Amino acid sequence: MSRILIVGGGPASHRLAGRLYHHGHQGPVTVLGAEPEPTYHRPLLSYVLTGRATPEELRLPPPPGTEVRCSTTVTHIDRARRQVHASGIIHPYDVLVLATGARTDVPRFRGASGPGVTVLRTAADCARITGDHVVVLGGGPLGVETAAALAARGTATTLVCSTPHPLYERLGETASALLTQALEHAGVTVRGGRTVTAREPGRVLLDDGTPLAGTLVLCTGTLPDVGLARAAGLRVRTGILVDDRLRSNDPHIHAIGDCAEHQGRTLGGIEAAWAQADSLARILTRHDAPPHRSTPTVFRLRADIAEVACIGTPDTLVDGAVRCLTYTDRNQGRYAKVTLRGDHLVAAVLFGLPDAIASLGEFHRNDRPLPGDRLRLILGGPPQPASTDLGAPEDALVCLCNNVQRQALAKAWRAGARTVTALATATRATTGCGGCGREVAELCARWARQPRHEEARTL
């Protein structure tokens, strides 16, 4: 029986431990997590900021057959003896999996690490965002989602980004400008083309000399946490280099999640991390397991202010070998930029078009050719998107990314999964692009209001 040791207490390690149990691994599995709390559903931290959920409600149930040690800091990997030193204890292993995640790329300016400044990576960080005024630095997905969540709870929020608009590099000029409008309509003040030069007591200074009052939240991107791997002599570029079996240059050490670099790319996000965890669980328990293949890249903004999605990678949007179709409706706040190679979707930027996000995402995931009437598809043609009708039929598709139907959610609810996090764990709904998060939360709220005697009849 092989001893599997997992370093890192995030969703990737939690998923791996659960899948190892599912595939019948017989040996001991131990998870070493640095945070004091058990694993929680990190992508839903914005729910904590808005007050829609508590940190406790985001916690994931302990993976079966696994020993989880919290508040454990790993200091050294002894590859020769196959031992990990952590918090004064030596942990032997036959297989070591590094799931150390990523850390915030903190910019260098005066006061960047002083009082009144916080990053947003953990549930504990949410509690540090206090006061009536908050300045969010960073125009990426986390910055936008954080600013929108803070504004939704009534906090005066300013979003500062170095590009002309938030998500400018992902969305392009037109769609990012629409995003700025949506943020400002939601109550967020957007300061594009600016950056922070200093944090002083009670205020933040921008590069044009403008002072802004409030707590400063750094959403300035992440870097794979590879310090432990590098110190152990593993090959590292941006992330820990792994092959198609998610194995490092040491055959006894694997890496998954934000810290891993596979086929020259580090893929952030829970969907990629879970896909790697699923692959590695099969690889470690089956001799005939197929190699890992990266999942299609899909980004969807987890915010109520607008329906925003990117399919594929931004560099394919400027590939000279593809055809580009563009649709713009500024009055309705709708935009689409779709690139094709032949009849197959290569990449897309979509704003304010939820039907197209659902339909084109499905075509991309399944590598199916698009029908001839592309405009109808963009504006709302088949296949139908996830239902937003709470009275929808049982087979209505709620989570397109993971093919979760309403009846599967209802079954999990009856089995005791009574929160969004619990339903995510049981069914994987909300863990892909995140676009179904609002609907799953609404279903939770509706089912929770129903008396017990009506529950069995209506679910």
Image: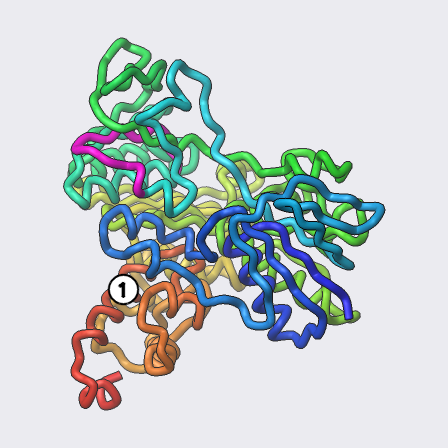
Where are the magenta residues, as a range?
Answer: 127-140
Vertical order, 111 against 40 (above or below): above
Residue closest to the eye, 358 or 35: 35
Where is residue 387 shown, x and y percent of the image? 29, 69
Q: Quadrant of residue 360?
A: bottom left
Which quarter of the rendered picture does the N terminus lie within? bottom right
Where is residue 32 shown, x and y percent of the image? 59, 53
Vertical order, 137 against 343 (above or below): above
Vertical order, 293 against 167 (above or below): below
Residue at position x 42%, y 46% from top? Answer: 310
Residue closest to the eye, 435 or 129: 129
Does residue 344 appear anywhere in the picture? Answer: no
Residue 138 counted in the magenta span: yes
Which residue bears the numbered disc 1?
441
The mark tally for this picture is 1
Does residue 298 appear anywhere in the picture? Answer: yes
Where is residue 103 shown, x and y percent of the image? 51, 37
Which quarter of the rendered picture does the C terminus lie within? bottom left
Residue 60 counted in the magenta span: no
Q: Please rate how many residues cluster around mark 1, counting C-alpha atoms within 10 Å: few if below 14, some from 14 to 19, many from 20.
A: some
